[in-house]
Amino acid sequence: MKDLTAYTTLSFDCYGTLIDWEAGLSSVLAPWAQEQGLELDTEELLTAYSAQEAAIMREHPSWLYPQVLAEAFRRTGRHLGTAVSDSWAQRLGDSVPNWPMFPDSAAALASLRRHYDLVILSNVHRAGFAGSNRHLRGDFAAIITAEDVGAYKPAAPPFESLEAWLDGRGTLRSELLHVAQSLFHDHVPARRHALDSVWINRRHDRPGWGATPEPAEGWSYGAEFRSMQEFAEAAAAAFRDRS
């Protein structure tokens, strides 16, 4: 990967990278499973859910994220042999604004904003991200959501929209660094689009894939960091060394 000072713009996945979407999902999936008497731990629930959500995103790219969440929950229930009521499905669909951010996200964004323009590229709806940004307090040059482009990552339209935004600003692709946790949703398509990326490996201390499907094709990234704090500190050090 190039020196971090060579980039002018950072694009971020939000849910999984800045917002703890696995904790958010689990806050609904776990009590539902307990109510149903399912003897599944959190990782097993997230793994069961992840395939259903990815399928809904492919099949219904124009649906808003709350609809995706609700239907993915219903399908997860059918997969596990237990029905999900409309009230439980709506509870998950409405939960996005309440999902917690990772403790280091807000401070890391504030630090990175001193050196870069920041962009959100997220599989969510605008209202959901607005709720999350009340926690993040991010100052973003652009916010590109699935609602805006009518498609969900890892499909091409979100990244094509990001590239169009770069073109409109006169920013070169080589000046953009994509920052994300999900290999499936972000690093596979970033490689397809020849975009540099760094992996925020939030699950570095846990085995398995959790709520993110295992990638079915190759991915790449220039560097790996275990947290946003590590990445922000590396960027700050790079700019100090340059001065």
Image (cartoon, helix red, strand yellow):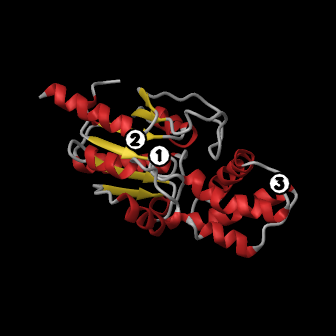
Q: What element carries label 1?
A: loop
Image x and y of residue 29, in percent:
70, 59
At label 2, the amino acid type is Met
Earlier residue among tags 2 and 3: 3
Q: In this view, does 143 lie to the left or right of 183?
A: left
Q: Is mark 2 on a helix, strand or loop?
A: helix
The label nearer to you, 3 versus 1, is 1
Location of mark 1 (residue): 17
The label nearer to you, 2 versus 3, is 2
How far is mark 2 from mark 1, CA to CA?
A: 8 Å
Image x and y of residue 104, in percent:
39, 47
Q: What element carries label 3?
A: helix
The label nearer to you, 2 versus 1, is 2
At label 1, the amino acid type is Thr
Instruction: Classify 12 as above or below 207.
Output: below
Location of mark 3 (residue): 79
- Asked if labels 1 and 2 touch by Cβ distance under 8 angstroms, the answer is yes
Q: Is residue 232 in view from this perspective? A: yes
Q: Which residue lies furthest to the bottom in this view?
A: 87
Q: Quadrant of residue 111?
A: top left
At label 3, the amino acid type is His
Image x and y of residue 197, in percent:
41, 34
Instruction: Identify the disc placed on residue 228.
Output: 2
